[in-house]
Image (tube, helix red, strand yellow):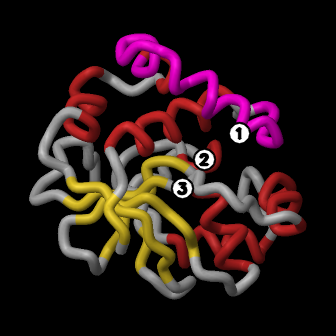
Amino acid sequence: MDPVSVAIVGDTLVACALVRTNPQDFAGALKKVSRLSGADKQAIAGQPESVWSELFLGDVEWYFTKLEPQTLFVNRTADAVLGEAQSCGKSMDLLLEEYEAGTLALKEKIDQLRTVLPSECRIIALTQDQQEYAIVEGWEYALAFILEHQPVPLYVGIGDEFRCFQC
């Protein structure tokens, strides 16, 4: 794993929020975000102050890495992964089963992502033990990489405990 600055990870999270409807303009959004204040970034990201502080002002160490598709990814931070209700605690394996069954909410978006996997990192995850990874941002991108049997490029925050984990 290669260390990265917390600013890069925070800016990535905000840029992802800016391009929800137009993912092609990620580079432009990232450039725009780099000029914003911390308060503006937090507001755009839509993260509660406690989560923003924990991830970007606390003791989390950030790295860039690529993890193998069979890595254990579990939703621990939200109850609306990929637009689904009751998703907290679901593993990537369960989401893959739903994708293959055609019941996953954002199947069409994932199919589009699979045709052109992005070169810039848009996936952010947290881990306490480097065995299980909780994706905070970019589930659909992670699914696209996994379905293409490609290593998943992501920013990983390593910490002892995350209060933002909800399940």
Identify the mark nearer the N-term, 3 or 1: 1
Crowd around label 2: few <14 · some 14–19 · many ≥20 (10 Å): few
Q: Does residue 134 show up?
A: no
For residue 163, above or below residue 57: below
Crowd around label 3: few <14 · some 14–19 · many ≥20 (10 Å): many
Q: Quadrant of residue 163?
A: top left
Q: CA distance from mark 3 to mark 1?
A: 15 Å
Q: Tell me the mark number nearer the camera, choosing from 1 and 2.
A: 1
Whether residues under marks 1 and 2 lie with C-beta atoms below 8 angstroms apart, the answer is no
Crowd around label 1: few <14 · some 14–19 · many ≥20 (10 Å): some
Instruction: Read off the residue under disc 1.
Output: 27
Instruction: Read off the residue under disc 3.
Output: 123
* In this rendering, position of residue 38 left or right of residue 49: right
Q: Tell me the mark number nearer the camera, choosing from 3 and 1.
A: 1
**Residue displayed at 75% across by 81% down:** 148
> Which amino acid type is shown beneath numbered disc 1?
Ala
**Which residues lie in the magenta part?**
21-42
Instruction: Read off the residue under disc 2.
Output: 84
Decide which of 18, 72 is in the foreground and name it.
18
> Which amino acid type is shown beneath numbered disc 2?
Glu
- Circle 3: element type: loop
